[in-house]
Amino acid sequence: MAAISCNVRSDGALLFSSTSAICGLSLRKLSPVSLRLPEVVAPSSTAAVRRLVKCSASPPPTSIAPPSSEKAKAGLTDFLHIDDFDKATILRILDRAQEVKALLKSGDRSYLPFKGKTMAMIFAKPSMRTRVSFETGFFLLGGHAIYLGPDDIQMGKREETRDVARVLSRYNDIIMARVFGHQDILDLAKYSSVPVINGLTDFNHPCQIMADALTMIEHIGRLEGTKVVYVGDGNNIVHSWLLLAAVIPFHFVCACPKGFEPDEKTVEKAKRAGISKIEITNDPKEAVKGADVVYSDVWASMGQKEEAAYRRQVFQGFQVDEALMKLAGPDAFFMHCLPAERGVEL
């Protein structure tokens, strides 16, 4: 049986191929950064000084277009959900990713689309692969990435998300954020005047699935018409697979224990698109038959570790092992978004 471990970061130059191409949809159109520094005023009194430096977190006047409108007018695009883009755009991103990856692997370092540009990376939720891939990839393509860890911002606690978005927009050309609550990424995009990339939320993980799609194209030769079977918890990874299935035609099956199914609205959205065959089942043995890819993730994600012992009991029978892969067939690939817990989900 063939086996590969896929991650948006784990396959050499793949680490930034998808991400850079995603960014490239909008970043190639970016104009030089404007720090929007206030005009220097010579105050005539202490009161004037106080008025000059006063900071307000209030929303901008209604007469001023919100950052999201400014962004749209400038032709800039966020990457928050896979189905924000149509099939042609998604395939173009993947084609471009292959080209960029091949160029990097050849040793050619002349392609520097992000030269002179900076990217702020917000990590409310830590990750080795996400940080290394975005930071390394942005550097290889000419840019400079700035890491902002959980204690650097404390978004929503020490400072409101909208203020974080406004400040980082003035200093940087792009913002990548890996957060817990999905609303945080939506708010960042709403108030940011530069493109925002979703590096993961509790709801979805679009860059991961784009890289998985690229890996399938490289190893299987195609994405369309394949059968992908996810075995485990109906989590954010599943939601992004469903959203991809709402754009690209393939057969997607989620085999999970009862009570751990993916979000009903997201499942319905994927089915309603009428693009792919979508199945949600509680029988992993039946599900994997004829699969091109068997996919797994940890049973208890970050923030769910207190449920780990309980989940290990409930998820018995959903481990991807030799027996399950034999049912999938000799040509099936195994994929995992990592990090993995060997002896648990696989």
Image: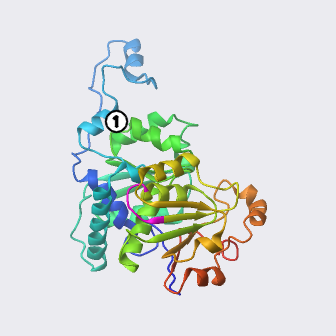
In the image, which residues are magenta?
Answer: 246-251
Residue 320 position in % (x across, y down): 64, 76
35 over 319 or under it: above or below: above
Predominant SS of the magenta segment: loop
* Scheme of colours in the image: rainbow
Secondary structure at badge 1 equals helix
Q: Nearer the viewer, residue 308 or 149?
A: 308
Amino acid residing under circle 1: Ser
39 over 246 or under it: above or below: above
Query: Does the magenta-highlighted stretch encompass residue 250?
Result: yes
Specify whether 216 is left or right of 229.
Answer: left
Count of residue discs = 1
Q: Nearer the viewer, residue 341 or 44?
A: 341
Residue 317 position in % (x across, y down): 72, 72
Crowd band around label 1 with a 10 angstrom C-alpha radius: few (<14), some (14–19), many (20+): many
Query: Does the magenta-highlighted stretch encompass residue 130?
Result: no
Q: Which of 200 and 203 is in front in this view?
A: 203
Question: At x 46% / y 73%, what residue is drawn?
Answer: 10
Asked where in the image residue 37 lies, by quadrant, the reply is top left
Q: Kindly identify which residue carries mark 1.
A: 68
Specify whether 26 is left or right of 217.
Answer: left
Question: At x 60% / y 81%, what residue is drawn?
Answer: 327
Look at the image and tell me whether residue 333 can be seen: yes
Look at the image and tell me whether residue 142 can be seen: no
Residue 193 position in % (x across, y down): 33, 38
Tell me the quadrant of the picture where the C terminus can be found. Answer: bottom right
337 over 290 or under it: above or below: above
Specify whether 148 is left or right of 62.
Answer: right
Question: At x 67% / y 56%, what residue is drawn?
Answer: 260
Specify whether 69 is left or right of 5.
Answer: left
Residue 43 position in % (x across, y down): 32, 16
